[in-house]
Structures are given as structure tokens and as C-alpha cells.
Amino acid sequence: MAPPDASASAAEAAQSASGGKRLRFRVQLVVFIALAVGYTIFFQRHLQVYVSETLLIGGTLSLLGLWKLIWDAIGTAGRGRPDDLLRRALESPNAPEYLAFATLLLLVLLATTSSIYLSYEGDGGGQPFTVEIWQAGKMLLPPQTLNPYDHTKGQPFFLNKSSADVEFRITSPTGYRPLKEPNHLWSAHRVEVPASFDKKALQLLRVIPGAALLSSLPDRADDPGRGYELRILTPAGQVVVPHYVKTVVYTGMTTEDLSTESDSDQHTALRQAIDDYLAGLHFPADQRTPMAVKLSANPMLAASAELKAASVVTFQIYARDAPDGGAAPATAPKESPIMSVSYTIPTDGARVHSVILESH
Amino acid sequence: MTSMLARLRNLFNMILVVTCASASAVAAPQVSVRFVVAAPTFAQNLGAVKSQVERDVATALASDVTAYFPVVLWDASAPAQAAAELRLTLTEIPASPLPAISLVWSAIVGGQAVSTADLPPIALYGSFDLERATHDPANLASIIQQKLAAWLQNQDDRERLKGLLKLIPLAHSVEVDSQAEHILVPLSLAQSKMDSSSILLVTFDVSNAGNTLRGKLKMSGLLETRSGVTVRTCGTVNAFEYPQALGSNGWSPLIPQLLAAPSVASVFIDEYVRSDFDTVNGNFVNP
């Protein structure tokens, strides 16, 4: 039988060892919970598309750890139960090593992983959207086409090295401003298409030759005789149509927007606008209809800076006489315009405007 | 030897025939045909090719008019001092919403502008015609030529052009055959493709006591006569007017007397009937 002092001392030692072991368990349990939360956050930020159950799994693990922590605090938590796997794992001698590795890995992943995901949100009218993603002059991904039925599109980027801003551009349809987002090595970009983009307030001008010009302009640029040059003076600069012929000229925006917007401008509406103008001058239908068809058949695009409502645009027409004895139009226009028409873009909310070039 | 002589004889005959033919030909008066693009929209837009259009249309017009009235020599490249000038001008007529474009006639005879009020303008583009060939010389020339051809096919319009023809003198001398009571003028019916039923008008100015009096006579029953290498047209008088004499519907003894005096005579078309017979070198082939 052991002396009472010795047994007391042993009991104290055992109690002390048990207390240290318990403290270490609790600390490792806290680290485990922190790791579970950290990985959950990581997966949730960057890999949700691929592992959509991350929140469920990570959350469950975190809750389990918390549950254990609480029960341990009130004195149970499976103590003495050999089948408690979590306790056995955390109390194992290798646990600190694994926890340290997992922590280090988590820190590296969180610090160097970014992701870009696009989702179809907002008033897209059901049409597909094509988005290009650029960073420092390079396209990060192939153009992404989003349809209304697409959940998300995109991917994570591991071990990032660049923190340059990322630019998202809707290339189809046009009419949206690019979206530039600051970027870090750990950024998670969530872009809603088209909701995250600002829609441009584009103003499309259809420039229609007036009756006098219609009876004067050449049909083609290489027609012999006098040529004409159209200059469009906008607040942002001048646009020149060197060979102005019998057709409609679209202007008011940049090349990319102009091609799409002029395409979407319904020919019926354009023809109607021409027909209305000519009908106002009492031209008979047999003259109006062929001319409306002709003018709308091959419109010219004159890209300009983006025009805004209330902008004043001046259209000047210059004659370019053929050189003596030559049939081809000359290159140098005359000094004074033969016609000058100013137009103020209305602020009534309309986006498409017909401008008739005629002397008043 | 015989063969050589025969050949020489043939050659001599050929030279004689050619000489006679050319000597007998009486030059028809030359009428300059001009087309002018004056409408500013067309003149400016056609630019350097305007003159080409003007030449093309003038040539076509001369050809068309010649087909109906070969009595004079219609020539698009005739010099400015021709007996007469027929001018067609592409003219802009103010209208709304667009100016109308018409072909307007004008004429000069003997250096003097003559009235063409009887020749109404030919409408080319109405004020509601939007499509105009302002940059297409070939198309413009073609459109104008079609308009002119259609215009000339119209009998009434041709009659109007005849009015101008009556102002152009075909000859400036006459002779009188008193015995036969014929008037002779230096014209070739065959060359003019003039039918014998045509009527010629002769005007003559006679100086009388310091005054110049003008007489007129009309010739009908025309017939081509040859005297040596000279070809003339003779006809009978069917009307005679002179201020100091009674008019008559036929021959007057005054005629030889008046025309024998120093006078200025001119021969005009009074009624032109085109001969349907073909001619070669100024001779009727199958009269």
C-alpha cells in the first residue's frame, strides 16, 4: 500500500497531466474549428461551383467541433469513450503536425487564390451575353457566353502572381460599359451579367439626304463627276465621310456599338422615316418607296465619339470637283460647304434620331 | 493592146463619172446641232464628262433629225458660221419640291436668233422625280436620246420642227426660164431627198427708186434637171406676190423682169415632203 503522500502526489501528477492533455485537446479543437471554418470560407469563395456542398460539409464539421468544445467545457465531450474518433485524432501525437500543415496550406490557398465567376442576372431580355475578361492587356479566359439557363461560368486561379485590375467587357450585345474591378491575389470576383454593368445611353443618328441632295448625290463612290464629302462635327471632334453617296449614314457612337446598333435598327422603321419625310414633301408613292428601299439597303457607318442627349452636331457637305479632264472624283474638297445643317439631339428619351440634310 | 485601150477607156469613164457626180452635187445648207447642259445640278455634277454628253446627244439629235429632214445637212460638228444652228439646252425650271428639268429648243438662222415658241420644251424630269442621272453620262445621254426619238416620232412635233426648217435658206440664187415659165433653183431633189410634191418659197429683194421691195413666189411641180454637170430643180409658179403688182396664182410676166434685175433672192422650204426613194451619191436609185 502506498503512503498517503505518495498517492496524493501521484493523483496530483495524474490530475496535472490530465489537465494539460485536456488543455491541449481544447486548443487543437479550437484550431480544428478554425481550420474547418477557414476551408469552408475558401471553398465557398473559390470553388463553390465545383463543390456546391462545401458549406454543408464545412459547416457540419465546424458545428461538430463547437459541439465538442462545449461538451468538453462542461466536462464530458466523450472523455473516456474510446470510440470518440475526433478526440482520439486530436489527442494523437501527430495531431499538431497535421494541424500545422493544414493551417499552412489554408494560409497559402487563401492568400494566392482568386476566382472569377459570372452569372446571368438582371434584365438581359433572355438573350445570350458574351463577356470578355481582360487583365493587363491579356484575356484571362476565352470569351464566356452566358445564357439565361446558365448557373455560373468561370473558374478559380491558383497561385496567383498578378494583382492588376480585371476588366469585364460585354461584347455582345453592345451598349454596356466595361466593368473594371480592383484585384488582389485573393480576390473573388462575382459578376452578374448584365446587372453589374452600366448600360450606355447611346444615341443613334440616321443621317438621311434631303430631297435636293437625293437628286444630286452620286450613287457610288466611283461615279464620275463631282463627288461630295460629309463632315460630322461633334463636341468630341470631327468625323469625315470622304465619299458621301446616296445612302443613309449612321453615326453617334463608336465602331463596335455602331455596327450592332445600326443592325438592330429595324429597316422597316428606317424606311418608314424616309417615306414619312418624302410624303411630307408630297412625293408620290412610286417615287418614295424605291428611294426608301435604296437608301436603307447599304447604309454607311461613321463611327464617332459617343454622343449624348442635348449634344449639338453639325453636318457639313463639301463638293469635290473632278480634276480637269478626269472622271474620278478629286481628293481635295472645296473650301466652303455647300450645305451646313445643325442638329440638337433631343432629350426626350428617344435613342434613335433621323436627321434630314436639307437647306432651310 | 486592145485590152490596154479598153482599160484606159474604162478608167477615163470612171474619172468622168466621178467628176460629173461631184460637180453636179449642190451643197445643202449646213445646220449646226448643239446640245448644252445648262442645268446647274447636271452641269456641276457631270463635271469633266459634261462635254462628252453634249457631244453624244448632239450627234444623236443630228442623226435623228437627218432621218426626217435630210433637206439640210444637220451636223453636230459643224462650225459656228453654219447657215443655222439648232440648239437643245438641258434647263432647270424652278419648281417644288425639286426643280424640273427640261430640254429647251432655241435656234439661230443667219446669225440671228429666231423664235422657237412653236417648239415646246421636252420634259425630262418632273419636280417629283427623285432619281436623276446627274453622275451617269451614259444613262443621261440615253434618256435624252430616247426622249428625242419619241418626240420626233410624233407627227405634230415634227410639223413644229418644220416651222424652223422654213426659216433656213436652201439657196441664194434663182434663174428664170421665161419660155417655159419655170423657175430654176440650184438644188438637187435627190440629194435633199425632196419629193416633187414639195413646195419651195422664193423671196427676192428688188431695189426700186431707192427703196427695197420684197417679193415672193412659190414653186411647185418640182423636177430635177441636169444641164451638163449642173443639177437644178425647176418648178412652176403657183403664187406670186410683189408690193407694186397684183398678186397672182401662177406665172406673171413681171417675174422675169424682177428676177433679172440685180436682186437678192433666197429659196426656202414652204412645204417639205420627204422622198421615199433611196438615193446614192445624190441620185435617185429607183425613182
Image (tube, coloured by chain):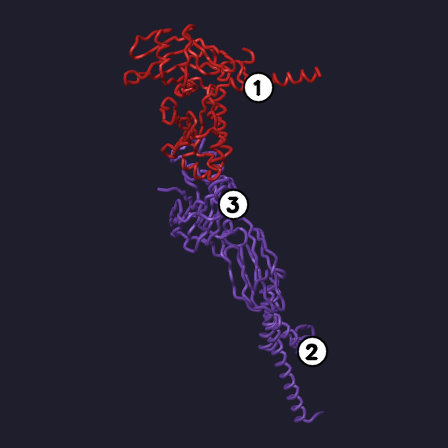
The subunit carrying tag 1 is B
Q: Which shade of the palette goes to chain A?
A: purple
Q: Which residue is mark 1?
A: B18
Q: Which residue is mark 2?
A: A94
- Badge 2, how many Cα within 10 Å: few under 14, some, many 20+? few
Q: Is residue B68 above or below residue B237?
A: below
The subunit carrying tag 3 is A
Can the viewer see residue B192? yes
- Are tags 1 and 3 found on a single chain? no
Q: Which residue is mark 3?
A: A263
x, y percent for residue A330:
48, 46
- Badge 1, how many Cα within 10 Å: few under 14, some, many 20+? few
What residue type is disc 2 on? Asn
- Residue at the (51%, 42%) spot, across then down: A326
Can the viewer see residue A274? no
| Residue in the foreground of this view, choosing between A202 and A159 | A202
Which element type, helix, strand or loop, lies under badge 1?
A: helix
| Residue in the foreground of this view, choosing between A189 and A44 | A189
Quadrant (top left/top right/bottom left/bottom right) for the N terminus of chain A: bottom right
| Residue in the foreground of this view, choosing between B107 and A132 | B107
Q: Is residue A236 above or below residue A29?
A: above
Mark toward the start of the polypeptide (2 vs 3): 2
- Residue at the (64%, 16%) spot, across then down: B9
Which element type, helix, strand or loop, lies under badge 2?
A: loop
- Are tags 2 and 3 found on a single chain? yes
Quadrant (top left/top right/bottom left/bottom right) for the C terminus of chain A: top left
**Which dot marks residue B254?**
none
Number of marks present in the image shown: 3
x, y percent for residue A33:
60, 72
